[in-house]
Every structure is written in C-alpha cells, then in structure tokens.
Image: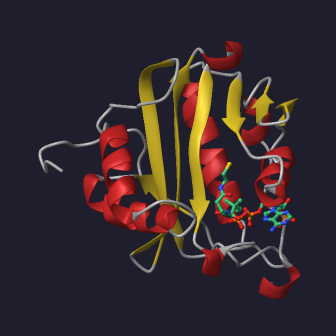
Amino acid sequence: MGSNHKPLPLFEPVATPSPLPGKSAATTGVVIRPAEVDDVPAMAAIRAAEWETEAYWERRIGNYLCGELGAQHALPGHAVFVAIREEVVIGFIAGHRTRRHSCDGELEWMDVTAAHRRQGIAGKLVVTLAAWFVEQQALRVCIDVKPENTAARALYAKYGARPLNPHWMFWEDIRVATSTSPTAHPADV
Ligand SMILES: CC(C)(COP(=O)(O)OP(=O)(O)OC[C@H]1O[C@@H](n2cnc3c(N)ncnc32)[C@H](O)[C@@H]1OP(=O)(O)O)[C@@H](O)C(=O)NCCC(=O)NCCS
C-alpha cells in the first residue's frame, strides 16, 4: 500500500477521562482517534481473527481509508476511528455516507479484540462515529449484522438501533447514540 495516502483529519484524539468514584474504570487509558495508514496492519489483524486473511483486510481497509470504499450505494465521506490502549490498537470502527436502505450513513466495520471486550470500548467507538455522522447531517444510519451475532445486536440496540430486517439494523436518528453512556462494570470500579 502506498504510504503517501493520509486519512482526512476528522477529530482530535479523545482521551477518556479519569472515572468518577463509583463509575467504570474499564476504559481508563483508552484513547479514541482517527485511524492512520500505519494502523492498517493492526486493524487487519483484528478483523482477520474473525474472517479472511490479514492480507485481504490490509487491502480492503487500506483502500477504504483512502476513500475507495467498495461498498454498495456508498457516497463520498467516510471515517475510521481506532481505540488505543498503551499504544496498541485494540479496536476500530468505520462508516461512510450512503444511499443504502434509504439511509444517510452505514456503519461498515466494528471490532474489538477478544481480550478487551465487555469493557465499554465498542460503546465509545459507536458514540464517536455517531458524532461524526451527526456532523455530516447523516442521521439515518444502517448496519449489516448477522441474525446470530447476539453480541453486536445487543451493542447496537443499547445505543438505540432497531431491527430493519433479519440482516440489518438501523438508527432512525443516530443522535440518540451520542447521548447513551457505557454501563459501569462492577468488576472495574
Ligand atoms: C460486538 C463487539 C464489537 C462488542 O465489543 P465490546 O467492546 O465488547 O462491547 P461493549 O463492552 O462496548 O458492550 C456494549 C454493550 O454491547 C452489548 N454486548 C457486548 N458484548 C456482548 C455479549 N457478548 N453478549 C451480550 N451483549 C453484549 C451489551 O449490551 C453491552 O453493554 P453492557 O456491558 O452494559 O451489558 C465485539 O464483541 C466484537 O468485536 N465482536 C466480533 C466482531 C463483530 O461481531 N463485529 C460486529 C459486526 S456487525
């Protein structure tokens, strides 16, 4: 992949604040920032743990980051954010503008490494991408999620998405996700 491609500067890095007493400490030290080309191998490795090879995902994600989205009905305008803990990419999320399913936006990928799940990290990524969609005035947002993927379906439902059909969920207005807080995890307080 060429190293001269740089992603659009979308947001300043967001460091999660220290937890208040009685709140979750699970995401302390996690930084959410726009993905860079150098993050592509780490993102590819995370996705390859679920399906396909790292080489396949390096090509797909690298192209996506450069604006070659490769998704049906996609429109220009995309964002990719990574979650970093101790300088390691532990999750990422990607989305773009679309006309699919009469929506304004589509959530393309959402992944957190197995070792870091159930700590609210996907929730933080969803809220960050939701804020980007709101900035784009792309409020109706869809996501292709397998019927058997109960973890992902519960995640999106927690942040306000509803079923569209057996394979898709959607947010009628994704602003609802930006006002949802990750739940405190008792083991982490
Ligand atoms: C789905 C996925 C991204 C969730 O990441 P995560 O960081 O563990 O999610 P969070 O900790 O932010 O969880 C937020 C909410 O999602 C739901 N959730 C997450 N994992 C769940 C699970 N295994 N079972 C049931 N609900 C789950 C819960 O409602 C949770 O809130 P709670 O902790 O207050 O109960 C992660 O499991 C993953 O990467 N899976 C493999 C890839 C994938 O399926 N991606 C989505 C494709 S559409």
Q: Quadrant of the C terminus?
A: bottom right
Left or right, 181 with reference to 70: right
Q: Is residue 130 visible?
A: yes
Q: Is residue 67 above or below residue 15?
A: above
Left or right, 69 with reference to 134: left
Front residue of this view, candidates 139 and 45: 45
* Residue at 68% in and 27% down: 141
Q: Is residue 140 above or below residue 28?
A: above
Front residue of this view, candidates 36 and 169: 169
* Residue at 18% in and 50% down: 1
Question: x%, y% of residue 38?
Answer: 26, 60
Q: Is residue 9 visible?
A: no
Q: Residue furthest front?
A: 52
State which image quarter holds ligand 1: bottom right
Asked which quadrant contains residue 41, the reply is: bottom left
Front residue of this view, candidates 7 and 3: 3
Asked which quadrant contains residue 30, the reply is: bottom right
Front residue of this view, candidates 168 and 188: 168
Query: How are the residues colored?
Result: secondary structure
| Figure label count | 0
Left or right, 127 with reference to 32: right
* Residue at 78% in and 37% down: 167
Q: Is residue 135 above or below residue 146?
A: above
* Residue at 54% in and 76% down: 29
Left or right, 37 with reference to 25: left
Q: Is residue 176 above or below residue 2?
A: above
Question: x%, y% of residue 143?
Answer: 69, 36
